[in-house]
Structures are given as structure tokens and as C-alpha cells.
Amino acid sequence: MPESRPASHPLALAPVTAPPRTADAFARRFLHNLNFARGVALSASSASDRYLALAHTVRDYLTAHWLEDVRRQKETQAKAVCYLSAEYLLGRQLDNDLLAAGLAEIAAEALASCGVDLDELRDQEVEPGLGNGGLGRLAACFIDSLATMAVPSIGYGIRYQYGIFRQTFVDGQQVEQPDAWLALGSPWEFARPEDAQTIGFGGCTETYDDDGVERSRWVPAWNVQAVPYNYMVPGFQNGRVNTLRLWSAVATDAFDLRIFNSGDYEEAVRAQTFAENISKVLYPEDSTPQGKELRLQQQYFFVAASLHDFLDTMLSDGFDLAALPERVVFQLNDTHPVIAVPELMRVLVDERRLDWDDAWEITRRCFAYTCHTLLPEALEVWPVELLGRLLPRHLEIIYRINDEFLDSVRERFGDDERLVRDMSIIAEQPVRSVRMAYLATVAGAKVNGVAELHSQLLRDRVLHDFDVFFPEKFTSVTNGVTPRRFLRLANPELSSLITAAIGDGWTTDLERLRELEPYADDAEFRAAFAEVKAANKRRAGETLRARDGIDIGDGHLLDVMVKRLHEYKRQMLKVLHVVTTYEGVVSGRVAAEDLVPRTVIFGAKAAPGYAMAKRIIHLINAVGEVVNADTRLEGRLQVVFPPNYTVTLAERVIPAADLSEQISLAGKEASGTGNMKFALNGALTIGTDDGANVEIRELVGDENFFLFGMSEPEVSDLAARGYRPEEFVQADAGLRRAIDLIASGAFAHGDRSVFEPVVSNLLHEDRFMVLADYASYISAQERVDAAYADQDAWIRSAILNVARTGFFSSDRSIRDYIDRIWHTPPLA
Ligand SMILES: *Cc1c(COP(=O)(O)O)cnc(C)c1O
């Protein structure tokens, strides 16, 4: 029912205005918010009060633009991107919003005039960790670029009450703590309970006669309320502010007074607890689907709420649904939101009473799908039993989509039942299940991989039959990262140096970093660049000391591997390099003084149920403990592992790095985005020919990249011939010594059993061929040492890495999505 709108006061007709952009006005607004929103005087305020008042003040400056953009998007009915993602790994908001609003200096001056320390307030913010790793961070980079490029768009996701766990180490082993990021207040969000959607689950379907037409309807057994929380997504200094809308689940009858009055308090809150569980926690899985009922509930919950929200609130009155594909594109960030496909069909056919064929024509033009993996075990499937119990009507719709699709396959290819079985959206083994990637591929207007190599492997392997069937459907968009957060905010000194050389246009036109190329040959610039790198190392050192009590070596080569812990990413290979170096010195074969001093920084969370990943974390900590304490190394090799790798930590560590470790087995890392952040900050990459490493190397040049390891075809060949890891151990004395040292218990106080599963897995299975790439990796690391000894040449390479990787801006990714998939021009 349309709500009544209040009669306007004349003042409400004037546009909403921001406070004046002066330090004085900013300070006044800050104090006002402290007094009236927090209810404290400055002299009595806590750092948290001051942070919250500051956040509200920044918000006050952005709101006018935001309201204007919301109005403009509705009024113009321009085609919009709805980015559907179960994860957004946002990082801290304060500095991002200050930069976007162009308020950084004004705020600093204003706070100083109040005697308030801005650095202290920054540290109050708990980053919203609503994602696991690369996929969630990509979504966050994309909404930043969409706003900066003024593309009509809205991001939809889930407001998890607990984000990614906080990692601690106890005796070197990972222990997970809940991430209560909302506990101290969440000043960046606007709750809109009045815009809630009701989302059904379970129940049954019925058919009925609708004036001679047989129709279906779904009668859910229970439902929950989806309450939206709006977040502003400011573009970079362009007066644009987009919306990120995250859904929170609450019970429909939050408080059943009748039951409560009868004395059954537990029963009254039970329904509430059950409903609220849906948005309670982020699944801390990365690269593997977690086959849990609650996860499917989360997925349907957020995409149903988002679809209905868009259809109910964004379309003009009397909108003709046949024109929906000209009005919106729903981008599916991996398979998590794919249940939106049958949901749109259900809305169009059951609720809006369109013909099936017309509804399908609309649906298949409204969706596009981004695939993020190559690991077969990471392709999401839902057992039919579960899907049918939770979403019975959706299962019927999926069956019909599949039947019609398989009919068309038979029509084209004849009755090749093996092919039909292979392409079916329904898998029969091991249990009857829905293959979500296939559903997305059949329904999506476009399917994209996230780097050139990945997209090619999708077409050649994972979705080969579909590529033959729909050759026009497949495309590629290489991932990117936002230069606002990962260069401007993370590396202010390098940013200033770049701007001093080539002006500041690069922030929104990152290819202009090319203009730095000649500076690689300018000795003065090289010296300034080296000084920036040294300053960033000091800054990272201060952060690690304050945060974790870790000291990092002065003047060391900083060798950094930060990313989720997964066997395919091969942190084990890095461990073997460290152990090899260590073993060389303690056995006396290498003199400590011949080592190029190095500090190796690891950062990685393991999924709580991923036992091998957790053992590897334990091993890294154990190796670090022994290596760091052994005086025979004369402090020339250090291994540190700060716990709880987050966006905030990434912003500190990456600008300080000399060497970026991107060492996944070729053909396993879809793209990587960490690799891009490092190159843009002037770290040299040691990496395999995998994911976007391929493109990085092509751009920076072989001489500025340490390539090693098998190529993807070589990996496939070896797998086909039969990979036997023991053969590599037998053939390589250095490898044997390293593995023997781990097996001996040297890193476990002599206890051989602790790391036996790790060693045994390497020797007998080694799914990701760590041992096959070991020799090549070690010799590449020797090239690194040799190259680092020539500091002038190294800095030159580092500058060229910065100058040549502007391609990896997420603005370029978004431009590619617009040209190849979305066709949504920026809004003037
Ligand atoms: C960029 C980023 C990632 C992705 O790193 P990869 O090396 O591409 O796996 C993961 N986590 C955080 C916090 C990041 O900032």
C-alpha cells in the first residue's frame, strides 16, 4: 500500500545542502554531532564518541549528493547495474569517504583546532569484514569504480551481524574469534525498516485456474523480514554517491505478545532467533562451497529481497516489464546469487502473469554471470532434496528451464545422451543436485572469466560444451583494484611523488601512470622513490610493532605473501624456500653473511574447517619461531606472521613490500587481485604463469618479473602422465634436506608427529605440485637475491612496475563490463 507523504514545509522544498567546506564549519558540525548525536561534551568524550561524531560529520557532507543521485536514478530510469554479491570486503570507511569527499585536509585542520587526534580516531573504526578474500574485495572495488564513473548502479548484499572471524594464534595455531563489528555502533549505515521485504521459505506449490489459464503459486510455510541498511558509496571527488544496500533478517512477528504473556518467553524469542540466524554470520569459506542449508537460505534471502526491492522501488509507475532488460542488468558475482534466476521467473510468471516464453526472454537478457574459479570442488551444487524443501516452486522452475534447454541441445546435437547428461543443470551423481554454474550459464546473457587465461580455461575445460553451444556468450574481464584505496590511501607518499611528476589525473585515469616510465631513468626520481619505499617499511614496522609486538629487520628485502591460506595458492612452497635457506646456513653449506637479508611476511586466514590449511599456518609459525631465534643466521632471515590479515593490514604491508609472492599452481588462481595491488605499489613479482600474473608480466616485461614454474599446459601434461611427487624429492638433494628437516621435528621441539600429515601429504599426494615447481622456484629466488643486490636496477624495475600496471584499475574493469556486458553508460 502506498504510504502517505507529508505535506511539504517550504524549507523542505529547498535542496538538501551540505555544511560549508571550511575547517570552521566542519569543526562546528563535528561538535554538534558530538553533543546532539552522542550526547557528550568534548571534554567528557571517549575516542569512540569522537570517531562516531566524525563519521556522522563526513556523512553530513555526502548526504545531499546521495539524495540527489537516488532521485536522478529514479527520474531518468537510465539502465542500472544491480551488482549481486554475497560478500563485500569493504575495509575501513572513514579515510575512504574523507578522500572521496575531498575533505581530508579540512577535517584534519578542524580536528586539530579542537585538540583531537585524527590518527587516534581512525584506529577506532572496526572494518566491516563482510567477505572472505578476493571475491568480496573485488565487489568493494567495483562499487567504488561504479560511483567514481557515475554509472547508475546499486550494490546488494547481506549485512552479516558477524563478518569474517578475527584470527588469533595460540601456540602458533589459528583460533577464531567472533567479529562483532557492529558492537560499538555503525555510523555509516541508514536502517530502513519501513522498506523491509517479506521473504518466504518452504511450504508447497499449488496450481489453480486463472480465467482458463492454469497457473502455479507458491505457498511458503514460513517467512522472514529482510530489512535494508543503506550505505553511501561516494565517487572520487565527483559529487556522486551510489548506494550499497545490505539486508538484515528479522522475524516477521518479532515479539509474539500472546505467547510471551502466556509465560513462554523462550517460544516467543525462538522464532526471532531462527529468523535472525539467516544474516548472523558470514560463511568463512573461500574457494569451496559450504553445503549448508543456512547458506542457501542466505542466498535466497538476499537475492529475493534485492530483486523485489528493485522492481518495487526503482521502476516508474506502469513500467512495461518487457523492457526490463533495457532498464537493469543483474550481475551475479559467482554462483552465490544464482537463485535469483528462478526467482525472477517466478515473479514474472506466477505474480505478474506473463507467459513462460516471454518471461524467459526477459530473464535471460537481465542476468550476467561472473565465474571466479577453476577448481571443480568449488563449483556450487545444491541437492534437489534440499532445494525442493526450501524453495519448491524454484525447483519446478529450474526443472522446466533445464528441460527446455536440454531439448534445444538435442535439437542441435542429436540424441547424444552423454552430452545431454554432461550439460544438464541437474547432476545425478553422487546425489541429485542443481549445478548452479550451469544454471547461471544457461540463463546469463554473458558469462565472464576474471583474467584472460582463466576465461580461456573456462571455455576450453570447465564450461567447454556450453562454449560450443553458446559461442557468443563467453567473454573475459580482467579484474582490477581501486587506485583510490590501494594507492592514494594506502601509499600517500608514493601518491605525492607520482603527482609531483605527472600531475594528479592518474587517480581516475590510471593508464596515465605510463608517463612515469621516463622517470625510471632519472636518478633523482629513483632516489626519491627508494626513500618512499624505505618510509613505507618504517611505517609498516611501526604498525606491526604496535599491533602484534613484531619487529621487522631494518634494511631487509621485504618478501610478502598475504592472501587466504589455500593449498592451491601454495604457501607451502614459500615455507620450503625459507626452510631451504635456513637449512643451508645451519648445515654450514652457506655462510650467513652471504645471505641477502630478508624478512618474510605471511598473512593468511584458513577456513575453520580446513584442517590442512590450519596445519600449514601452524608450520609457518613454528618455522618462524625457530628461524628467528637461531643466532647462526645473524638476523639475516626473519619470518613473521601477523595474525588477522584484513584490508586494513593490506593497506599497510603492501606499500612496504619489495617482493610479491604470487606462486599458485598454473591454472588454479582465477585472477588474483593481491598481485595487482603489489605491482601498483612498486613491488616486483615472483610468480607463476597463472591468473592475472600472465597479464602483469606481459605489461611490466620479463626483465621486471621473476617468472618460474610450469605453465598450465605443462601442468596438465604432468597430471596426464601421472604425477609422482617422490620422484622430485629423489632428484633434488636440497628439496630432500628441507623436507627431512620438517619431518625430523626440528620445528616441533623434536616431535615428528606434529607436521607428519603435512609432509606425508606432500610426499604422497601433493595435489598442487609444490614439489614439481620447487627447483624452479628456488632458482628464481636466487635471481631475486642477485637482482636486489643492485639497488639502482631494482628501483628502476619497481618504478616500471608502477608505470606499466595502470591497466589493473577497477575503473578499466568496469569500462570493460560496460562495453562487453552491461551497456550502461555513465549518467551525465
Ligand atoms: C586483495 C585482498 C585479497 C585477495 O588477495 P589474492 O592474493 O588475490 O588472493 C584477500 N584479502 C584481502 C584483505 C585483500 O585486500
Image: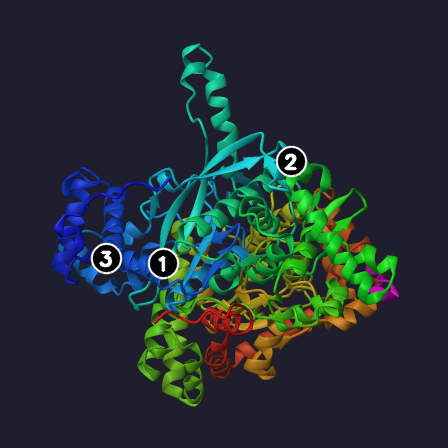
Residue 15: image x %, image y %? 19, 58
How far apart, in angstroms, are the residues tagged by discs 3 and 2? 49 Å
> Relative to residue 643, is residue 499 depicted above or below?
below
> Which residue, given by chain and number where applicable, does mark 1 sit on?
74
Callout 3: few (<14), some (14-19), or many (20+) C-alpha neighbours within 10 Å?
many
Magenta region: 719-727
The total number of labels drawn is 3
Q: Which mark is residue 61?
A: 3
> Which residue, given by chain and number where applicable, does mark 2 sit on?
205
Residue 68: image x %, image y %? 28, 59
Q: Nearer the viewer, mark 3 or mark 1?
A: 1
> Relative to residue 636, is residue 749 depicted above or below?
above
Earlier residue among tags 3 and 1: 3
User: Where is the C terminus found, in terms of image quarters?
Assistant: bottom left
**In the rendered structure, does residue 721 fall within the stretch colored magenta?**
yes
Residue 122: image x %, image y %? 31, 52
Callout 1: few (<14), some (14-19), or many (20+) C-alpha neighbours within 10 Å?
some
Earlier residue among tags 1 and 2: 1
**Residue type of the residue flagged with mark 3:** Tyr
Residue 499: image x %, image y %? 33, 78
| Contact check, label 3 and label 2, Cβ < 8 Å | no
Asked whether 128 or 792 is in front, the reply is 128
Mark 2 element type: strand
**Residue type of the residue flagged with mark 1:** Lys
**Residue type of the residue flagged with mark 2:** Thr
> Relative to residue 620, is residue 573 depicted above or below?
below
